[in-house]
């Protein structure tokens, strides 16, 4: 299978797409076509365990990788998850399920892909005959950074550098990153918000001068951000797996539709669900949940993407994003794969902060997606009510998703839609990753200390505390550096020497 740029100027193999991260014309790599999964194949997948299902889905795209080796890498990656199943589906009530994706080493769903990406990248380098060392640059709104550091620590021939917005991540996220172990890692705080941070890293990627300077030092740039197809591919797998789990537990019959609600920031997770649907998974509506930073809600309602608006810091920092990079892939599909038009729109976005899709395209988006957003109070109330009613604690990002899932159910009632379609809400982080806000939501109490928060939530919910978070308390802080957004490349050069 080949991959093409959303802006039309490049066509490469899967290995190449993953190693390069972003296309040289500034576009994102997308598969040349969507590989189909037939009804018979879905039936076959029922008997598979999670790594086998994931290998099956990934190999449909990455057929230049050896399937057996891929499966072995996936087994190893998902072997690091607590309690066996990396993507358990939990039934809350009839027709309502949680897909828990936070049982990995850093307690957020990013682990689903970032435990696998190091293999995809290193093998990709071999397949492409690349001899240089790889330098991974990551801009993070919190969870990606830690998951990438953990995935790549001490990987041979690879160095990784993570940039996070100085005031834009939770205390726990910051602690997770700044205590990271490994000889090949570096972490720097950037003055500004996530978009400043992401734009600054993108500028390095798009600069021929920066690339040349790195090449002199025998380094090749790559990205572990969710624009990398190697991040997207493993995420497609859990939508298949959730569906198959619903079938094998007799909640639905094979062929029935399922809806998903996804707490959304950079549009990577929900895009993976859209890809699964394009491959033939019986998916109904994809519900795109946003917090107060509701640019996607407005876009899906109006067809106008407009970044000229205030940026809010919320309790769900991994969703505090105004420029959702992965949306470019959806825009490309919706336009009928018109690369020229996509490039035009992305240029408009970077020049004027705004673009508009046609009425026809907007309607096509709304056929696939429903979007909603929540205020901080609504999120907190929803988390509290849900815990009181079902005894199920959720993190703040999942709280946003749950509230929007309820908005969607109300919208369906109001429009007299009687079709019964089960809803799977994607749970993206452990409640213990955001202990202060979660404790506040569940009890109304504020605690200053994250670890005290963890203890109180544990007493209240009896939910097991992840080992990796417990261990954080006694780790040394290794990284304290802060940099201005326009000085990041100086930091990079210092790091590679
Ligand atoms: C990254 C993240 C999100 C947003 O996912 P996208 O793929 O960026 O849309 C939501 N919740 C949590 C906990 C995250 O870490």
Image (cartoon, helix red, strand yellow):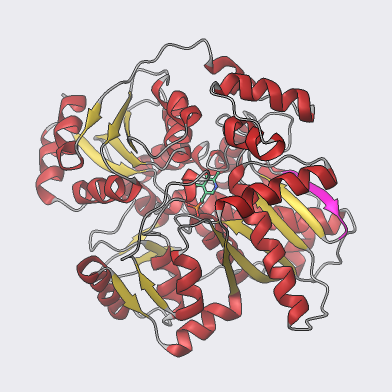
Answer above or below: position of 96 versus 462: below
Q: Nearer the viewer, residue 70 or 198?
A: 198
Q: Residue furthest bottom?
A: 360
Residue 495 can be seen, yes or no: yes
Q: Residue at x 30, y 48 (%)?
A: 198
Give the image quarter of residue 471: top right
Q: Would residue 44 be counted in the magenta stretch?
A: no
Where is residue 271? Give x, y as percent.
52, 62
Residue 62 can be seen, yes or no: no
Q: Residue 386, image x and y in percent?
A: 77, 48
Q: Is residue 359 left or right of residue 11?
A: right
Q: Position of residue 414 (x, y in %)?
A: 75, 80
Q: State the predominant SS element of the stretch in magenta.
A: strand
Looking at the rendering, which quadrant does residue 201 occupy?
Answer: top left
Is residue 93 inside the magenta stretch? yes
Q: Residue 72 falls in which quadrant of the image?
A: top right
Residue farthest to the right, as pictured: 250
Question: In the displayed structure, would residue 158 be above or below residue 201?
Answer: above
Of residues 421 and 338, the one drawn nearer to the viewer in this rendering? 421
Quadrant showing the C terminus: top left
Above or below 241: residue 213: above
Residue pictured at 38% horizontal, 67% vertical: 328
Q: Position of residue 458 (x, y in %)?
A: 73, 24
- Tally the marks: 0
Q: Nearer the viewer, residue 287 or 67?
A: 287
From the viewer's perspective, tell me whether residue 275 is left or right of residue 312: right
Residue sitting at x 45%, y 89%: 359
> Over which residues does the magenta segment extend?
88-94
Residue located at (31% from left, 66% from top):
308
Q: Nearer the viewer, residue 43 or 305?
A: 305
């Amino acid at each position: 299978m080949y991959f093409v740029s959303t802006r039309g100027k490049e066509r490469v193999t899967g290995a190449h797409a993953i190693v390069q991260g972003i296309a040289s014309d500034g576009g994102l790599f997308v598969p040349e076509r969507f590989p189909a999964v037939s009804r018979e194949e879905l039936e076959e997948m029922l008997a598979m365990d999670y790594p086998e299902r994931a290998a099956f889905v990934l190999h449909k795209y990455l057929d230049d990788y050896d399937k057996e080796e891929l499966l072995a890498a996936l087994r190893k990656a998902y072997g690091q998850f607590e309690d066996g199943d990396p993507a358990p589906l939990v039934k809350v009530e009839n027709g309502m399920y949680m897909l828990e994706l936070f049982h990995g080493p850093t307690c957020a769903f990013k682990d689903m892909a970032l435990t696998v990406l190091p293999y995809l990248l290193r093998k990709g380098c071999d397949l492409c005959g690349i001899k240089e060392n790889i330098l991974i640059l990551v801009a993070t709104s919190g969870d990606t950074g830690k998951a990438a550091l953990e995935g790549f620590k001490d990987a041979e021939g690879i160095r990784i550098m993570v940039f996070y917005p100085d005031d834009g991540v939770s205390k726990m996220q910051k602690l997770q990153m700044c205590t990271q172990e490994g000889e090949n890692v570096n972490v720097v705080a950037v003055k500004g918000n996530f978009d400043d941070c992401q734009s600054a890293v993108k500028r390095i990627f798009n600069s021929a001068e920066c690339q040349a300077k790195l090449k002199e030092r025998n380094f090749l740039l790559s990205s572990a951000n969710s624009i990398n197809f190697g991040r997207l591919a493993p995420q497609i797998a859990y939508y298949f797996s959730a569906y198959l789990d619903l079938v094998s537990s007799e909640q639905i019959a094979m062929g029935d539709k399922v809806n998903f609600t996804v707490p959304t920031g950079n549009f990577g997770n929900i895009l993976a669900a859209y890809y699964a649907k394009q491959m033939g998974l019986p998916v109904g509506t994809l519900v795109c949940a946003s917090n107060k930073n509701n640019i996607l809600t407005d876009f899906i309602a109006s067809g106008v993407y407009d970044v000229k608006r205030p940026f809010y810091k919320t309790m769900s920092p991994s969703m505090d994003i105004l420029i959702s990079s992965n949306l470019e892939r959806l825009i490309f599909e919706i336009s009928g794969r018109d690369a020229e038009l996509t490039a035009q729109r992305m240029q408009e976005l970077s020049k004027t902060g705004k673009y508009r899709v046609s009425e026809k395209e907007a309607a096509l988006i709304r056929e696939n997606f429903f979007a909603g957003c929540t205020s901080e109070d609504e999120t907190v109330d929803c988390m509290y009510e849900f815990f009181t009613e079902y005894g199920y604690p959720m993190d703040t990002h999942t709280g946003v998703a749950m509230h929007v899932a309820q908005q969607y159910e109300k919208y369906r009632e109001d429009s007299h839609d009687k079709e019964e379609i089960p809803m799977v809400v994607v749970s993206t982080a452990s409640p213990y990753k955001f202990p202060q806000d979660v404790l506040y939501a569940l009890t109304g109490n504020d605690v200053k200390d994250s670890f005290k928060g963890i203890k109180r939530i544990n007493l209240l919910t009896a939910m097991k505390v992840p080992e990796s978070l417990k261990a954080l308390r006694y780790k040394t802080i290794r990284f304290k550096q802060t940099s201005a957004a326009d000085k990041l490349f100086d930091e990079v050069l210092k790091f590679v020497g």
